[in-house]
Amino acid sequence: MTHTHKVWKLGADIDTDVLAPGHAMKHGLDVLARHCLESVRPDFVAGVRKGDVIVAGPNFGIGSSREQAAAVLVRLGIVAVIAPSFSGLYFRNAFNLGLLLLTCAEADAVSEGDAVTLDWQAPAVITPQGRALACDPIPPFLMDMVRAGGLLNQLRTRFGKEAVNG
C-alpha cells in the first residue's frame, strides 16, 4: 500500500531551539510539542497531521544535543524529515527515537503542501509529478530502528521489557 504525505516546507539551519524551545523545556513533551517551530511556522502545530513530512534546507537540527528536538516531531506525527544535510547529533537522536531522516540533495524540488510518496527501499522521495528524488542510503540497522519505533522499542522487542526498563 502506498501512502502520500503532506509536505511542510522549512528553510535552512533549523536549530534545536526552534524545534524544542528552551522556554518550554521545563514542561513535558506534550506541552513542549505545542511550541515546536512556533518562531518560524506559527501555523505548524495547529495544522500538522499524523503522517506529514518536513522538507527543509541544509543543516537541519543544528544546535544543542537535546533529544526533545526529535521527540516533538515524533509526538506530532511527523514520519520523516527530508533535507540535504543534518546535524550529526540530531541525526542519531532522530533514528534512536524512530524518526526517519532522508538526506536528499534535491529536497528543494519539493514544494509546500505537496503530497509526496516515500520509497523506503531506494530510498527516494517521489514528487506529485512522479519524479524520484534519490536520497542517501540508510544502513539497515537504522531502518530497523525506525520500523520498531525507536531504539528502546527495538531493545524491548529483542530482550524483553524488564531487561530494558530495569
Image: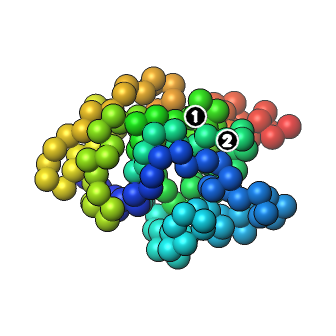
The residue where tag 2 is placed is 63
Position of residue 25 in the picture relative to residue 11 (left or right): right
The residue where tag 1 is placed is 87
Q: Quadrant of residue 40?
A: bottom right
Point out which mark residue 108 bears.
Answer: none
Residue found 78% across the figure and 33% down from its top: 163
Between the residue at mark 2 and the residue at mark 1, the CA separation in whole angstroms equals 8 Å
- Looking at the rendered structure, the number of numbered marks drawn on it comes to 2
Mark 2 vs mark 1: which is more N-terminal?
2
Residue 157's x, y, as percent?
A: 62, 37
Position of residue 116 in the picture relative to residue 69 (left or right): left
Position of residue 51 in the picture relative to residue 30 (left or right): left
Residue 37 in sight from this viewpoint: yes
Q: Is 166 in front, or is 126?
A: 126
Kind of residue at disc 2: Gly
Residue 28's x, y, as percent?
A: 78, 63
Residue 47's x, y, as percent?
A: 47, 74
Kind of residue at disc 1: Ser
